[in-house]
Amino acid sequence: MVDLRSDTVTKPTKQMRDAMYHAEVGDDVYGEDPTVNQLEVLAAEVLGKEAALFVTSGTQGNQIAVLTYTRPSEEIILEADSHLFYYEGGAVSGLAGVQTRTLHGKKGQIPIHELEAAIRGVDIHVPKTSLICLENTHNRGGGVVLPLSYMELVGDVSKRYGIPVHMDGARLWNAAVALGVEVSELTKHTDSVQVCLSKGLCAPMGSILAGPKDFIDEARYWRKRLGGGMRQAGLMAAPGIIAITEMVQRLEEDHNRAKSLAKKLTEVEGFTIQLAEVETNIILVDTKQSGLTAAEVLSILKDKYQILANSFGPYTVRLMTHREIEEEHVLKTIEAFKGIRAT
């Protein structure tokens, strides 16, 4: 089976499994797990922040950030297709009790003039704007990268209005590799950032939430309140250390493979891809001209060709490359799409 559903399906490497077996552990709720402590110090340094917190998932990291920055009845600004709004079970309203102000962006970027216009003034009739949220890379945008110039503009708005910026950087290392910069360059205009260790970096679980020390101190309370306090968590932190130190540069392989697959797919009649927008490891395939819905294409891929993918809408199929996708899988996928068209 060729699994192009997501980079979340990656398995930990042998080095990671060995590190888990040999990890030195303690009770992390008491702050006594040396491997977790090592991971948090390392992550804070690499991300250019004062402190970091190991959390169970990207969603938990994002929600802890919202809970830490906001109070019930306040408002947060989000891009309309962002993961925080689209894929986190309505948690920002259910847990933090905040209102969402969604703005439509292009390639994940909310136009700066619209972002600034959405910030509430002082008026008893309206909620207080308490947080701006970004996503880099942008999942539903097709893995597109928010460039440094855009991050700086958002940072300028943040400073002018005194509103913090949280970045959902689940695939932030993909963005850094695509731009050829250190990941800290992408975080310096944000107050906090969440990064996943369990996607393209191949750790079995976990994310990092990083930001100012006082923010992380408060976030630690919220992690506990959400049931995220972990005991001998060094078993899971150990592969996270390897993810950060050993697995980042290989992401370029995923990007190159995605671009190769996308380029070949553009030659298959009936399927449309915006090739210029394949910047990292995500490909969005428009199926409309084939006369088939995304659901129909996915069904044929799975049942006839043993290829798994995901739907991003009635006529959009998402393919995602990762460490376990090789050139032979790319070729098999191309042949499958040709077969679909031929029928």
Image: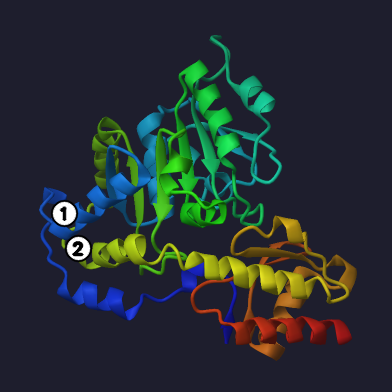
Q: What element carries label 1?
A: helix
- Asked if marks 1 and 2 touch (Cβ < 8 Å), the reply is yes
Q: Is residue 324 above or below residue 127?
A: below
| Residue 7 image position (x, y, % from top left) | 51, 68
Splitting the image into 4 quarters, where does residue 178 fall?
bottom right
- Asked whether residue 91 is in view, the answer is no
Q: Which residue lies furthest to the top in this view?
A: 123
CA neighbours of label 1 inside 10 A, class few (<14), some (14 to 19), many (20+):
some
Q: Name the residue under label 1.
A: 28
- Label for residue 234? 2
| Residue 118 image position (x, y, % from top left) | 63, 23
Mark with earlier residue (1, 2): 1
- Label for residue 171? none
Label 1 vs label 2: CA separation? 8 Å
Q: Nearer the viewer, residue 120 or 22?
A: 22
Which residue is depicted at the point 59% across and 64% down? 281
Q: In this view, does 337 lie above or below 51?
A: below
At label 2, which amino acid type do we have?
Gly
Which residue is depicted at the point 69% across and 82% down? 333
